Amino acid sequence: MSKIIFNNVHKSFNNRLSVLRGVSLTVAEGESHIILGQSGCGKSVLLKCLLGIIKITSGDILVDGISVKDSSRSDEYMRKFSILFQGNALFDSMTILENVEFGIRQIRRNDKGRIREVAEEKLLAVGLERRVFNLYPAEMSGGMQKRAALARAIAIEPEVLLFDEPTSGLDPITGGKICHLLKKTVNSLGVTSLTITHDIRVAKFLSDRASVLHDGVLVWTGHTGDMERCGNEFVEHFHRASHAISRRRVLE
Amino acid sequence: MLRSMAVLGRYTLFSLHEIGKASIFAFNGIKNCFLPPFFFRETLRQMMVMGFYSLPIVGLTAIFAGMVLALQTYVGFTRFGAESAVASVVVISITRELGPVFAGLMVAGRVSSSIAAEIGSMRVSEQIDALRTLQVNPFGFLVAPRIISGVCTLPLLVLVADVIGVMGGFVVSVTLLDFSIGSYITQTVKNMAMIDVISGLVKAAFFGFCLSCFGCYHGFCSDLGARGVGDATTGAVVSSCIGILVLNYLLTALFFGI
């Protein structure tokens, strides 16, 4: 059953700069889908269009049959999502416990008694210790911030989890740990997930199914293992380039 | 000739566009002050930032304004043998004009810039997008508490500035200009009209609205990157100060029937 449908999505800014050009994609319920692409190809714009933060120029995006353009059902639409932002987007003026509580408080207005309990439970679930609960985001490392942001994202019990470059800015060891945590979290919650990344290793680790975006056009969708010999020149080049970098890192 | 007309036209259109954008922003901000959910904790935090932490700077400005005013008035008025009017000039000037305007400008410099920088940084680091994904209206969470705090705390700050400013004039008059304590106090009380104090407080409420609104507006409209946030900060202070001076004129004309 389809969970998310991108139907011929176009986005241009000021009627000139065309960022997305006819993106069509279907993500099934419970699927972990990856969108790969170079920097500036429109991956983050696509994610923001899905969230309704950026309005699409034409086409449509449907989640469980609800259109992103249907303002009368925007609350119902938005309640389905949670996102782990590239820069974590934790609120600076709040401790991480307050960050998680804040998210829960907005979504579950009728269940105020359990807010702290749920927030602590989620922070522990992502591997953070109690002693850091009252730290401000600026006092924590990048990896810890990523975990706290993930706790905030899962605390509101979304149906769709979105990850925007989940390992960017992290060292390889921490990035690996975060990848494991994301995979474990998605599997345990059984939610649909959509990850945006330019890192093929992350893509292959998190999911079997991926799409490649190039200059605003979705040029390939398929099994991550087939990328190497998919017949699309850009996808094969992207794959080779990523592996060449990995080999160079190993040699260094 | 045609080229200069085109430039003038472009500039006029741009200015009207900006005024329109800022007016819609202000309207949305006011609307969200009355719409739930209400963020009481954030509002209290803003009141502390705008009100309590601005007390020293407002107090210092007021005391020196009062002291200088007493000295200058004395020097000027002795030429006409009207030194006895120093107390009344000090109290009227401080309560009507100097208290509200100086407090407004100082708070604009301190708070409006910090609001623009904070919201601009939140925009850069996607915190405003995060609010939207948590189904929190950024106007309700960021703009409304700041507008409410500005409107509520500025009159209180001005009240403090009035008292400290008058005290400054009193100290200089009694210690340096040989006024007697009793006659100075009598003159001050006699010439202190309630309309002067109230007009100052009403002005302060408008100034508070103006500086918080411009701070939020420039923060929300800032370009991405450090330079964008810097420009937003500068824009917020400049707009707030100009707004305060324009409002001051309009409210003075309104209050004193000109």
Image (cartoon, rainbow, N blue to C red):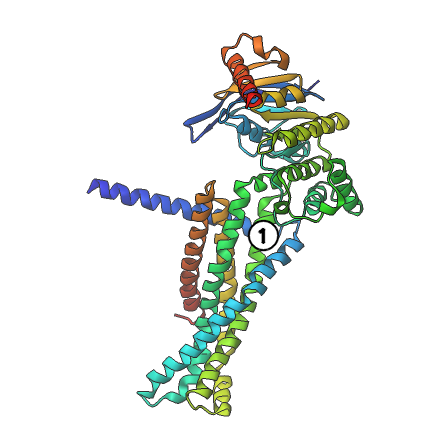
Q: Nearer the viewer, residue A34 or B202?
A: A34
Q: Position of residue A2 (x, y in %)?
A: 68, 19
Q: Nearer the viewer, residue A128 or B216?
A: A128
- Chain for disc number 1: B
Please rate how many residues cluster around mark 1, counting C-alpha atoms within 10 Å: few if below 14, some from 14 to 19, many from 20.
many
Quadrant where the N terminus of chain A is found in the figure: top right
**Does residue B175 lie above or below B16 as drawn?**
below
Let me know if residue B199 appears in the view: no
Quadrant where the C terminus of chain A is found in the figure: top right
Q: Residue furthest front?
A: A252
**Does residue A14 lie above or below B20 as drawn?**
above
Q: Residue at x 68, y 39 (%)?
A: A148
**Does residue A241 lie above or below B178 as drawn?**
above
Q: Residue at x 23, y 40 (%)?
A: B3
Let me know if residue B127 appears in the view: yes
Q: Nearer the viewer, residue A30 or B225?
A: B225
Q: Residue furthest left?
A: B1
State the image quarter where residue A5 is shown.
top right
Q: Position of residue A104 (x, y in %)?
A: 72, 42
Q: Position of residue B51 (x, y in %)?
A: 57, 63
Type of the residue with mark 1: Ala
Q: Secondary structure at mark 1?
A: helix
Q: Residue at x 58, y 63 (%)?
A: B152
Side of B155 relative to A72 (left or right):
left
Side of B116 relative to B8 (left or right):
right
Q: Nearer the viewer, residue B162 or B26?
A: B162
Q: Position of residue B203 (x, y in %)?
A: 48, 66
Q: Which residue is mark 1?
A: B144
